[in-house]
Image (cartoon, rainbow, N blue to C red):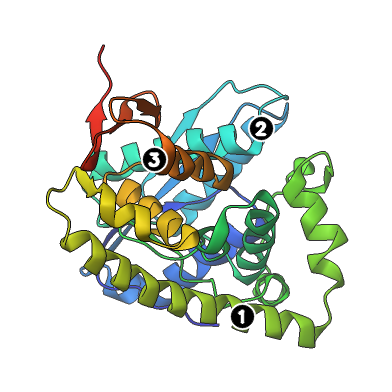
Amino acid sequence: MDITVQPGRYVVAISGGVDSVALLHLLHTQYRSLDNKYQFIVAHYDHGIRGDSAQDRKFVQELSAIYGVPFVYDEGRLGRQASEATARDARYKFLRSAQKGSDAHAIITAHHQDDVIETALLNLLRGTGRKGVTSLRSVDGILRPLLHVPKQAILAYAKTQNLAWREDSTNANKAYKRNRMRYDIVAKLTPAQRKDLVNHIAHLHDLNHQIDKELINLLHIQPHANHLDRRFFLILPHDISKELLAQWLRHHDIRNFDSKQLEHIVVAAKTFAPGQVIDINKDHILKVNKGNLALEPRDR
């Protein structure tokens, strides 16, 4: 099992579970002879959700010493009732801080093919649309070199290499939506179903890229970066209006909206009288003018 990473300094997110332990072993095995070109920093975040999580930190710290790589960590006190989203946000805040502090090129995570499938299905159920189905991928600043590798292959590799890891007891707790998706649906897919689903996700990713290019072209003909021509917007088919507005908001780094909110904004943008205002988020409003839709900062 091989992974490809370009030369540079990286923060590697290591929880102590089998996926991240296998990732660290792969990086060490493949690039240890090139330490003048590759530098890895192990980063561990203790969410403060489980009573035994301090043992995970100790395990990862000892593993880092064995591999001879720097180790950084932080502790949160999220509590047992913390949601998956809260834990994820806290973890990535720490990882980005570690990346900035070490002047690293990117963060490397151990997300794998099963995570791609779980995320696609969960986001499909949440109604996040075409972007949510393909959201788990490598992006600027975050590398996920194991996305093509099934969980079973990672587990087999870890056993073959006699690796030790920590089992997170919350991974078996079906109170979490992702765990229910993992055990009740993804684990029961046949090999053929799994292959088809992975291919569909990959195809949608390519299609999204093409759609985004066309939407960007439409945005380039707008009169101002913060304005949409309202007359142009009114004559667009409803679904195209939603796609264009979503792309426009993302262009302004506004991403915390779902399909229900997007539907509301589009309907309001087409039906509100000039002078009315649409709430976007805590920082922005959309002002409806006779000739345009203006994205403006919210008054403080």
Residue 138: percent from the left, percent from the top?
Answer: 41, 65
Mark closer to the observer (1, 3): 3
**Image quarter in which the N terminus is found:** bottom right
Q: Which mark is residue 165?
A: none
Residue 67: percent from the left, percent from the top?
Answer: 45, 58
Dots 1 and 2: beta carbons under 8 Å? Answer: no
Residue 132 horizontal side relative to residue 5, left or right: right
Residue at (66, 70) in percent of width and height: 158
The residue where tag 2 is placed is 83
Within the image, what quadrant is residue 222 found in? Answer: bottom left
The residue where tag 1 is placed is 200
Secondary structure at numbered mark 1:
helix
Query: Which amino acid does the dot numbered 1 rest on?
Result: His
What's the distance in space between the residues labelled 2 and 3, CA to CA? 33 Å
Q: Is residue 165 above or below residue 252?
A: below
N-terminal-most mark, 1 or 3:
1
Dots 2 and 3: beta carbons under 8 Å? Answer: no
Residue 39: percent from the left, percent from the top?
Answer: 29, 60
What's the distance in space between the residues labelled 1 and 3, CA to CA? 33 Å
Query: Which amino acid does the dot numbered 3 rest on?
Result: Ala
N-terminal-most mark, 1 or 2:
2
Mark closer to the observer (1, 2): 1
Category of crowding for the residue at label 3, using alpha-carbon neighbours closer than 10 angstroms: few (below 14), some (14–19), many (at least 20): many
Q: Is residue 81 above or below residue 214?
A: above
Query: Which amino acid does the dot numbered 2 rest on?
Result: Ser
**Image quarter in which the C terminus is found:** top left
Residue at (12, 48) in percent of width and height: 224
Q: Is residue 264 above or below residue 172?
A: above
The residue where tag 3 is placed is 269
18 and 112: which is toward the camera = 112
Category of crowding for the residue at label 1, using alpha-carbon neighbours closer than 10 angstroms: few (below 14), some (14–19), many (at least 20): some
